[in-house]
């Protein structure tokens, strides 16, 4: 007798927002694979769809609301579909979601991704018993949130690795401390073990993630007397054989220590690029933003870094049109951008997040003014990005080969420089996972093109 097997359920995860969210989607994906689910090629063929959301900016929140309309239609066509939503937007707007999107099957918060397989089981059994309602769990979990055992990494060479959760800084515009909770670091032993495992599997690059990596070690996930700083953690990771590059994101300027700058200047494995969000070049606005540093302090850091690590490249985040920002404040930001010469700038216009301190500030600016300032700053940053990119032309630089576009002939390998520039070049796919020397022949603002030497 032929035994008919039920086909495995297929899942599709759509991720919005920062690297932390993308990394958490890799963790969710690993969990579902372990439970026997299969990844779907696209959203149409999925039996389970999960949105991992962001609420840091308006654009992400608007996209998510738009996506919910699409999901509703899919569910009407296929009532057996299981729909889940989680992450920052779901944490902040769970009530709104329950009211406006009752077709969702489960909602999870920023700290309970590990229970997603249980949530799916609850949905399935509630359907059998006809006792159906959206399953909601946005509770704050204990240290078990850090048990990442079966992560499904999307890159075969370079792995994102969260080393901490949450943030204690409460910058006045930012929703993160409200949706991700207080800052908690993973135990160094667990991190080292995970990195060693990745090295054994052939990973060459580790990107350490946290909302504020520089303050790693302030509070651990379990009660302990351990005292380990971020610099010490980096030193230990640098000693792991097989790992050739280490990056980290995000650094808060107020916590960037001299020890860390010294280590960056001497340790070859630590990449010479730094994402250092400045947010504004005006002291008055920095104070209103509660950023806890001044323009002079920030520029002092940049100068120290440029002196000790001459080849270093910088990227940053900037918010224009913060409440009360005058044309003079904006010009301070413009001048700072010209002085630092970031290779890349992530520029945004201020959008108010409900419940943050900035919501209550007076003198919110019109959208027209904010847009105008954003365009002006973008024009300047785009020019700097292009000029800085052109400096690579004719140089021969080490590139970590990350992958290949197998559909293309000729220039089809992709990799990154130490300074985090994408490079496209020709060569054998056997080079994936190696650091090779590439001569740069052509540049665009965000991509370099070259040939292997
Ligand atoms: S440091 Fe400030 S901007 Fe960054 S996550 Fe924490 S509160 Fe938000």
Image (spheres, rainbow, N blue to C red):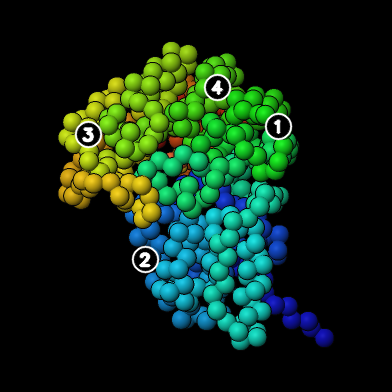
Viewer can see residue 5: yes
CA gap, disc 1 and disc 3 = 44 Å
Dot 2 or dot 3: first in sequence order is 2
Q: Position of residue 436 (x, y in %)?
A: 56, 27
Q: What element carries label 4?
A: helix
Quarter location, residue 218:
top right
CA gap, disc 4 and disc 2 = 43 Å
Residue in front for this viewpoint, 165 or 344: 165
Residue drawn 54% across the image and 40% down it: 210
Which residue is the site of mark 2? 66
Which residue is the site of mark 1? 226
Residue 147 lies, with reference to residue 255, above or below; the image says below
Marks 1 & 4, CB-CB < 8 Å contact: no
Marks 4 & 2, CB-CB < 8 Å contact: no
Is 390 on the left or on the right of 254, as rendered? Answer: left
CA gap, disc 2 and disc 3 = 32 Å
Residue in front for this viewpoint, 76 or 54: 54
Residue drawn 34% across the image and 21% down it: 296
Which residue is the site of mark 3? 330
Marks 3 & 4, CB-CB < 8 Å contact: no
Dot 4 or dot 2: first in sequence order is 2
Dot 1 or dot 4: first in sequence order is 1
Residue 319 lies, with reference to residue 118, above or below; the image says above
Quadrant of the rendered image holding ligand 1: top left
Residue drawn 52% across the image and 50% down it: 180
Residue at the far top in the pictured view: 307
Q: Choose mark 2 or mark 3, whichever is in front.
A: 3
Which residue is the site of mark 4? 260
CA gap, disc 1 and disc 4 = 19 Å
Quarter location, residue 124:
bottom right
Dot 2 or dot 1: first in sequence order is 2
Dot 3 or dot 4: first in sequence order is 4
């Amino acid at each position: 007798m032929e035994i008919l097997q039920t086909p495995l359920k297929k899942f599709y995860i759509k991720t919005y927002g920062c690297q932390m969210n993308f990394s958490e989607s890799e963790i969710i994906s690993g969990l579902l694979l372990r439970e026997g689910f299969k990844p779907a090629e696209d959203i149409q063929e999925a039996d389970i769809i999960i949105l991992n959301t962001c609420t840091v900016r308006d654009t992400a929140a608007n996209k998510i609301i738009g996506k919910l309309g699409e999901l509703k239609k899919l569910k009407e066509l296929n009532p057996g579909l299981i729909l889940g939503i989680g992450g920052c937007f779901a944490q902040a707007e769970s009530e709104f979601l329950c009211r406006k999107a009752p077709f969702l099957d489960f909602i999870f918060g920023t700290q309970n991704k590990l229970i997603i397989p249980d949530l799916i089981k609850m949905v399935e059994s509630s359907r059998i018993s006809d006792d159906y309602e959206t399953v909601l769990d946005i509770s704050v979990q204990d240290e078990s949130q850090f048990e990442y055992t079966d992560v499904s990494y999307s890159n075969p060479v370079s792995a994102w690795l969260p080393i901490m959760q949450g943030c204690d800084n409460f910058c006045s515009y930012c929703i993160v401390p409200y949706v991700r909770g207080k800052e908690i670091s993973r135990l160094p032993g667990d991190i080292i073990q995970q990195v060693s495992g990745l090295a054994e599997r052939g990973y060459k690059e580790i990107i350490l993630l946290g909302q504020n990596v520089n303050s790693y070690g302030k509070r651990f996930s379990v009660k302990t007397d351990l005292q380990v700083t971020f610099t010490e953690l980096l030193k230990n990771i640098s000693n792991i054989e097989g790992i050739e590059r280490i990056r980290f994101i995000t650094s808060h300027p107020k916590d960037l220590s001299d020890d860390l700058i010294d280590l960056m200047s001497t340790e070859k494995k630590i990449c010479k690029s730094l994402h250092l969000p400045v947010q504004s070049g005006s002291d008055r606005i920095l104070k209103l933003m509660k950023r806890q540093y001044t323009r002079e302090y920030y520029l002092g850091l940049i100068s120290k870094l440029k002196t000790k690590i001459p080849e270093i490249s910088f990227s940053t985040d900037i918010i224009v049109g913060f409440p009360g920002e005058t044309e003079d404040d904006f010009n301070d930001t413009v001048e700072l951008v010209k002085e630092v010469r970031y290779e890349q700038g992530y520029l945004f216009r201020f959008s108010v997040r409900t419940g943050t301190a900035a919501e209550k500030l007076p003198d919110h600016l019109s959208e027209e003014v904010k847009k105008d300032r954003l365009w002006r700053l973008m024009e300047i940053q785009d020019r700097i990005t292009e000029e800085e990119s052109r400096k690579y032309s004719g140089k021969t630089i080490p590139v970590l080969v990350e992958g290949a576009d197998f559909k293309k002939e000729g220039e089809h390998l992709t990799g990154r420089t130490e300074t985090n520039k994408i490079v496209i070049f020709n060569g054998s796919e056997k080079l994936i996972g190696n650091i090779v020397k590439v001569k740069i022949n052509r540049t665009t603002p965000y991509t370099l093109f070259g040939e292997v030497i």
